[in-house]
Amino acid sequence: MTINLSAYKTLYLETARKLVGEYVKVISSPEIDQTIPDLVRIFHSIKGQSMAMGYTNIAQLALQIETLCRALVESKSHLTPALREILPPPQKLLDELDAIEKSNTDSSIKEKEEVILKQTNEVQTKPLEILIVEDDLFFQKMCRDNLKDESVHIDFSGDGEDAIGRMAVKKYDCILLDIIMPKKNGFDVLQYAKDNNIIPKTPIIVFSTLGQEESIKKTLVMGAVDFINKGEFDYNSLLAKIKTVVSKG
């Protein structure tokens, strides 16, 4: 199966531009007390999508703003005019996206489009049941389309609460878990798995992003078997890692 990265690049650009449009509305809104959580959501999404596509410049910029806004939320500070001044102008983000769009015809992209999903020699009488817990719809689509393999069947969950509900009624061979999610986060899901003897029977691999080193250590202590940096993996290696941890179990 070929991986059409140009198509995903187009999808990424469309969704990223929509998020920048939301950003413009937020920073121009007079309701400043309500805008900081919106900025956290917007830049968390931009960061995750950019890392999934390997665009580290945008991902790092988004991480810096997300971190600043989370600190403001925790300290119950307001988004004052002075703070607005240190936020990146929307045009800076748009310029980065324009540069990506211009590179659509790069030969390196064309070469990557010819990457074939590796097939394992292992014969599966029944597909592996995988649960991917990830709130970013863009990242979900990337996984759904690129992990097509007759040896695996994948369920998706968009928040920790839904994931716990699924885990309560279905036994999975492997779970891929994001840390920062709505309703219940990755730590809550890990605690549920630990309390209900899902760990160590079912291996759990944690999705991570830049700046989550301490969170990664915590998840490993709680029973996760491994972690994957969203910005530094390909889907071939992800599928291989899933099969490796399942075989060890």
Image (cartoon, rainbow, N blue to C red):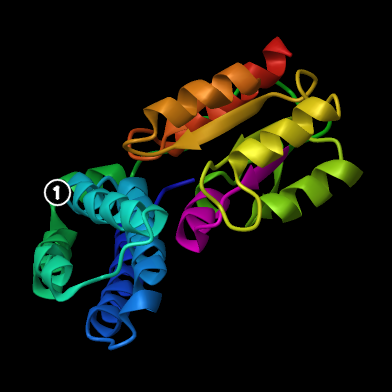
Q: Nearer the viewer, residue 174 or 60?
A: 60
Residue at the spot 59% in from the left edge and 57% down from the top edge: 182
Above or below, comparing residue 23 to residue 68 in the picture? below
Residue at the spot 38% in from the left edge and 51% down from the top edge: 48
| Coordinates of residue 241 in the picture (x, y in percent) | 54, 23
Question: Is 76 part of what is drawn in magenta?
Answer: no
Residue furthest to the right in view is 169
What's the magenta region? 130-144
The picture quadrant where one finds residue 10 is bottom left
Residue 140 as seen in the image, left or right of residue 231: right
Residue at the spot 36% in from the left edge and 76% down from the top edge: 33
| Coordinates of residue 223 in the picture (x, y in percent) | 66, 20
Q: Which residue is mark 1?
A: 107
Question: Is 140 part of what is drawn in magenta?
Answer: yes
Above or below, comparing residue 225 to residue 39 in the picture? above
Residue furthest to the bottom in view is 30
Q: Nearer the viewer, residue 237 or 195?
A: 195
Residue 24 as seen in the image, left or right of residue 177: left
Q: Amino acid at mark 1?
A: Ser
Instruction: Specify whether residue 4 is in view.
Output: no
Q: Nearer the viewer, residue 196 or 100?
A: 196
| Coordinates of residue 139 in the picture (x, y in percent) | 47, 54
